[in-house]
Image (cartoon, rainbow, N blue to C red):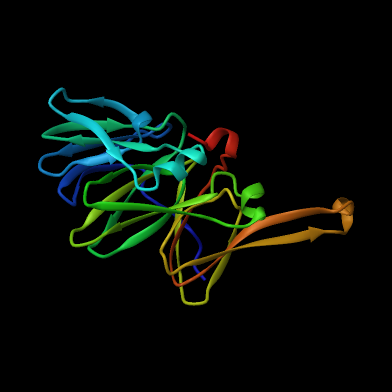
Amino acid sequence: MAVPELLATHVVDEKYAGVTYHIQGELVPVLQVEMAQTGIYFEHHVLLWKDPAVNVGIKALKGAFKRMISGMPIFMTQAAGPGRIALSRDGPGHIMALHLQAGQSVDVREHQFIAASDSVDFTFRRVQGVANMLFSGTGFFIDTFSTQQQEGIVWLHGYGNIFEITLGAGEQIDIEPGGWIYKDPGVTMETKMQKLSTGFFASGGQMVWNRFTGPGRLALQSMYMPLEFGGE
């Protein structure tokens, strides 16, 4: 099986899904998007700067009441050009882009999302099980971004650096519950718990991880952010 590989940290003049974007900065990176006919939406607190000609407004979310109960954002901000806009999360890390072809989707941990093009649809689901509630940090909800008739783009933020691996059918990898960022829908996830009953931890400690089974892409972040710091 292959090992996770570091994704690019610097992108300039990348064109996709009707926008041109740039990712720059090594410690707290900035995403700059040039918009013409295609707009984007994003979490309201990540806006850094914009051209005066760029209009911003509110994008309502489906299932807003459930999101409110979970303590998560219940609205997104939309931006329309022509013009430029820059976004940045208030924390060290790595910004990357997922290019989605028409009809493609991706599952993302909550609080990793920065922005998406208007052609991308958004839904979410709750990860059931007490182990996920206690040990998965901000991974209690999984956001799904998908496209229908048009291609689209999703930008994500990872703490530390982002690494990606492509699993073959039946291939597996165990990841610390706070470490994974996104996966293809074909990659399944289950929570594993192992009791530590010998040696130094003979008092009854335990380890918890998420086991992922291919086929498909899977990404992880090198810096784990616990719930108290990751819950924007």
Viewer-proximal residue, 102 or 221?
102
- Image quadrant assignment for residue 37: top left
Residue that sits furthest to the bottom in the current view: 169
> Does residue 30 appear to the left or right of 181 in the view shown?
left
Q: Is residue 143 above or below residue 57?
A: below
Can I make out residue 157 in this image?
no
User: Which residue sits at x=71%, y=60%?
Assistant: 193
Can I make out residue 54 in this image?
yes
Q: Is residue 87 above or below residue 102?
A: above
- Image quadrant assignment for residue 115: top left
User: Which residue sits at x=51%, y=40%?
Assistant: 69
Residue that sits furthest to the front in the current view: 65
User: Which residue sits at x=29%, y=63%?
Assistant: 104
Viewer-proximal residue, 7 or 141?
141
User: Which residue sits at x=58%, y=57%?
Assistant: 128
Find residue 211 and report its horizontal and vertical position in percent: 59, 64
Q: Is residue 79 above or below residue 212?
A: above
Find residue 118 and report its horizontal and vertical position in percent: 22, 47
Residue that sits furthest to the top in the current view: 52
Find residue 157 and report its horizontal and vertical position in percent: 41, 42
Find residue 206 and report its horizontal and vertical position in percent: 77, 54
- Image quadrant assignment for residue 76: top left
> Does residue 223 appear to the left or right of 150 in the view shown?
right
